[in-house]
Amino acid sequence: MYKIGTLAKKSGYSPNLLRVWEKRYGFLQPGRGSGGQRLYPEEDLRLLLVIRRELEKGRSIGELALLGRAQLLLTAGAAAGSDAAWQPQPGSGEPGEYGAFVAPLVEAAAALDLTALTLGLDAAFSRLSPDVVVHRVIAPAMARIGGEWRQGRVTVAGEHLVSSLMEYRLRNLLEASGPRVGASVRQAPVICACFPGEEHRLGLLSVAYCLARQGLPVLYLGASLPFAALEVSINQAGAGSVWLSVTGPEILQSSRRQFINLISAYPAVRFVLGGQAVTAEDEQLSNKGCRVCPCPFPLPDGIVPLLG
């Protein structure tokens, strides 16, 4: 039996968060010691370790709460068995150390197989750190799937299936990383958004995750944000920097003048622009003080120099 302080140290969660989860979700089932203090059984610690593993896979605490305590403990045993049975594919033809984790995701996209896709992602998150999965598994898998789509070996439906699931995992990882916007932290909030008309979000989410892992409060505003709404958000949040993504050259050109006006209106705010539409030779934006990040951009290593 553990006191809450010991349970917090062993599980990696703060005592305040454990109290919130106990009250809101009923995850924990403490008894009482002779002095009336809460005492938590070994099963509660096992449950919290299961929750940590599932959160690291990109699942949300709300999703886990719907499963309930008993189901989570049962799922833990089943997941351990399925993970033991799943093996990375040797000789997959994928380059790099993590190619064996990439290949099943590409094949699942081609087969429109949600079960295989989920198993592949779960196995990657179980065996690798979240940072490695995001930058060494998900990123190359999406690049490979994009190439397969252009060659007709992956359908639009397969690409959308993979994108939606990976976006879901990345958003949950982002939510679980870094301080909350509005929390008592010294850094000014960071805004992450896509150019008006830009719908591709995975690259932006990866950048937002990197920023959160640096301890910055990130305000992720998603796809196709009008510049008028972005300006309001900068003022309301007191943003210190704005990170924008654009993949279509025509989208960048159609909004270029508005973007330059926005940069000029906020000289104290750092603007960073990345994506497939961005080129290192864009002197107009560079001369206005915008930091440009041509594609491919090295994540996470390229983030730190941009923060200085």
Image (spheres, rainbow, N blue to C red):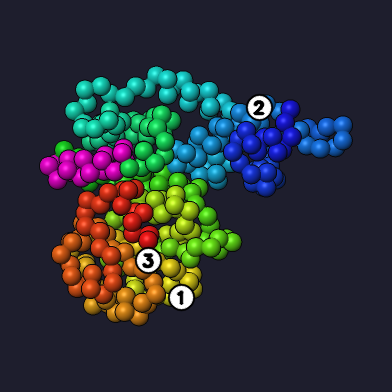
- Mark 2 vs mark 1: which is more N-terminal? 2
Label annotation for residue 43: 2
- What residue is pinned by disc 3? 242
- What residue is pinned by disc 1? 235
Separation of disc 3 and disc 1 at Cα? Answer: 12 Å
| Main secondary structure of the magenta stretch | helix
Separation of disc 3 and disc 2 at Cα? Answer: 44 Å
Separation of disc 2 and disc 1 at Cα? Answer: 47 Å
Image location of residue 65, percent across then percent down: 58, 41
In the depicted structure, whether residue 252 falls above or below residue 120:
below
Query: Mark 1, residues whose alpha carbon is within 10 Å: few (<14), some, or many (≥20)?
Result: few
Image location of residue 296, percent across then percent down: 22, 51
Quick one: SS at disc 2? helix
In the depicted structure, whether residue 70 falls above or below residue 8:
above
Q: Is residue 164 visible?
A: no
Q: Residue at x 41, y 54 (%)?
A: 211
Of 194 and 97, the residue lying toward us: 97
- Say what amino acid the circle numbered 3 marks: Val
Locate residue 268: give its quadrant: bottom left
- Callout in the foreground (3, 2): 3
Quick one: SS at disc 3? strand
Q: Residue at x 83, y 32 (%)?
A: 33
Was residue 151 drawn as part of the magenta stretch in this picture?
Answer: yes
Query: Mark 3, residues whose alpha carbon is within 10 Å: few (<14), some, or many (≥20)?
Result: many
Q: Residue at x 85, y 37 (%)?
A: 36
Query: Mark 2, residues whose alpha carbon is within 10 Å: few (<14), some, or many (≥20)?
Result: few
Image location of residue 174, percent across then percent down: 45, 50
Magenta residues (range): 136-152
Quick one: SS at disc 1? helix
